[in-house]
Image: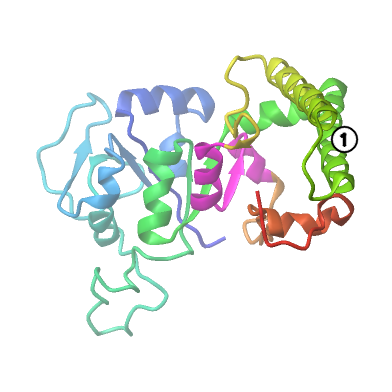
Amino acid sequence: AGKRLIFVSNSPFWYCDAGMNYVVGADWRDQWDVVITSAGKPAFYTEDNRPFREVDIGTGKLKFRQVVQLEKGRVYTAGCLKELTQCINWSHPLSSPSGQDDIPYDDIYSPLTSPTVMYVGDSLFADLVDAKREFGWTTAAVTPEVGWEIELQRKAEFRVAGKAIEMLLNSLRLYQRQLGTGIRSREDLEVMDKMEKLVSSWRDEQTRLLGNSFGSVFRARYQPSLFAHSLRRYCDLYMSNVGSLRHYSPQHRFYPESPKLLSHEIRGSNPECCDIDDDIFF
């Protein structure tokens, strides 16, 4: 598809070699245009004066010679993005015509700044945040918890708990709507307290079904967690396993649903229970 594959790992060569030999085979290095180990991310993104060193595949030791070009089949260590673009002749689509000087690296159209680069990583904060924030790359997070939760959400017990919570919350909204804007009586407050305790009980049931005392990594109780917010902010795609990409063409275009985080954006989906006149959102 006219794309180059670059392997960049913080792990040392011996570790990468053992894992990739087991998963892919002895010729795994031939599947990548460049292989970089012990990259030292996130410093790999932020520093601009870290030269590459070549790793001796036979001994695992570093070779004492300057690296000016990254070759397929060889293994390198350390380095940085600026050195990478120089060593593989990485050019930006908006770079100047042939025969002229390249656009400077600190320009907004630097070869480093390009949405045509897709970075796939399994560590949100070590791999993906700087790639998106600093360079605007298309980022894809490998998040195994997604697969576990999808399987759980398909179970009848979890779906019943979710429906019960939704029904109770909608009932509380309708109940308060019927009560109007006046002071609540003691009986009214007792009814609401009991219904809120039922909501808490069903949320505890969802946590129990997850199988750990901390609940979902994507939720802090029932609000999106910091991890979920960061995943939404810094990742264009996320999946439980990198093998999920095999279901799509290399030219596939994803059209995600509109992210709705604020109450006034969500209410259109359930106006019967949530339509109000005042501009107060919770």
Q: Which residue is mark 1?
A: 167
- Give the quarter of the image for residue 191: top right
Say whether residue 200 is left or right of residue 69: right
Residue type beneath disc 1: Met
Reply yes or no: does residue 79 show up in magenta: no
- Image position, residue 60 (x, y; %): 24, 26
Where, quadrant-wise, is the N terminus in this rendering?
Answer: bottom right
Span highlighted in magenta in the image = 225-246
- Image position, residue 114 (x, y; %): 42, 66
Q: Is 91 placed above or below 5 here?
A: below
- Image position, residue 40 (x, y; %): 27, 38
Helix, strand or loop under label 1 = helix
Residue beneath the point at 20% across and 51% down: 47
Residue beneath the point at 27% across and 46% down: 44
Q: Is 252 placed above or below 107 here?
A: above
Residue 221 in sight in this render: yes
- Image position, residue 267 (x, y; %): 77, 55
Say whether residue 17 is left or right of residue 177: left
Foreground: 246 or 31? 246
Foreground: 229 or 9? 229
Q: Is 18 placed above or below 4 here?
A: above
Reply yes or no: does residue 234 show up in magenta: yes
Residue beneath the point at 77% across and 42% down: 183
Residue 33 in sight in this render: no
